[in-house]
Amino acid sequence: EPEVTQTPSHQVTQMGQEVILRCVPISNHLYFYWYRQILGQKVEFLVSFYNNEISEKSEIFDDQFSVERPDGSNFTLKIRSTKLEDSAMYFCASSGRQNFWEAFFGQGTRLTVV
Amino acid sequence: AQTVTQSQPEMSVQEAETVTLSCTYDTSENNYYLFWYKQPPSRQMILVIRQEAYKQQNATENRFSVNFQKAAKSFSLKISDSQLGDTAMYFCAFMTSFGNEKLTFGTGTRLTIIP
């Protein structure tokens, strides 16, 4: 069964450092998303991406964040200068054109900022 | 903006019993989708069941069924014959019925199945 793959599973970084979280969506999917879950809290939408551009972003997704689909298969989330409050689980998701309502989630990357 | 409310932070039930998780939502849209996602200790989000707002019939997937009350904006999940593997966080979520739309999640209900 096709799946969304995220790497790394856990990343520890120092405050102020840049991190790149990587995702490989399901190959024929067209819509891509990043969500964030701070420990013990609800899952929050960060950004959606379609046709090589951002289609929607939340208030959380400020200038420190960027997304890219560099090579047609990977989908990355970059945080330029990490803050302590960026510590969270980050989930990538993708969906197809026909069943756009069915978002397939990756297993998440746990980001710890120290 | 849409909001999703889950008023039960934690629930527990004996194995093989039936449990119902509650969810209410607020929207001005007429067409939308509602979902229940399961998040086990592995942390991956797994789709349990979905309901299209235009369908009056409640969705069912094996032991999982929903009670969708559109006028009341209520969307509860019933788990029958609960199993130990059902222990997880359960999130109710909302999506408008267009492509490329985000999910709006509730705060979750932690369900524990007691052997």
Image: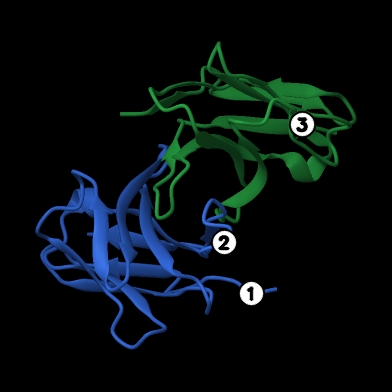
Work out whether residue B5 or residue A112 is closer to the camera in this orientation and state it. Answer: B5
- Work out how far the residue at label 2 is from the one at label 1, CA to CA, in angstroms: 16 Å
Locate the C terminus of chain B by quadrant: top right
Q: Is residue A105 above or below residue B30?
A: below
Q: Is residue B45 above or below residue A109?
A: above
Question: Which residue is drawn at the image coordinates 51% and 22% (left, top)?
Answer: B6
- Work out how far the residue at label 1 is from the one at label 3, CA to CA, in angstroms: 26 Å
Looking at the image, is mark 2 or mark 1 nearer the viewer? 2
Amino acid type, label 1? Pro
Q: Residues within 10 Å of mark 1 (few under 14, many from 20)?
A: few
Q: Secondary structure at mark 1?
A: loop
Question: Which residue is drawn at the image coordinates 33% and 66% (left, top)?
Answer: A50
Give the residue at mark 2.
A98
Give the residue at mark 1.
A2
Check residue B64 in the rendering and tell me which mark sits there, or answer none: none
Q: Secondary structure at mark 3?
A: strand
Q: Chain of mark 1?
A: A
Work out whether residue A11 or residue B22 is closer to the camera in this orientation and state it. Answer: B22
Give the residue at mark 3.
B65
Please give the letter of the chain rendered in green: B
Q: Position of residue B86 (x, y in %)?
A: 75, 41
Question: Which residue is drawn at the image coordinates 29% and 53% (left, top)?
Answer: A87
Q: Chain of mark 2?
A: A
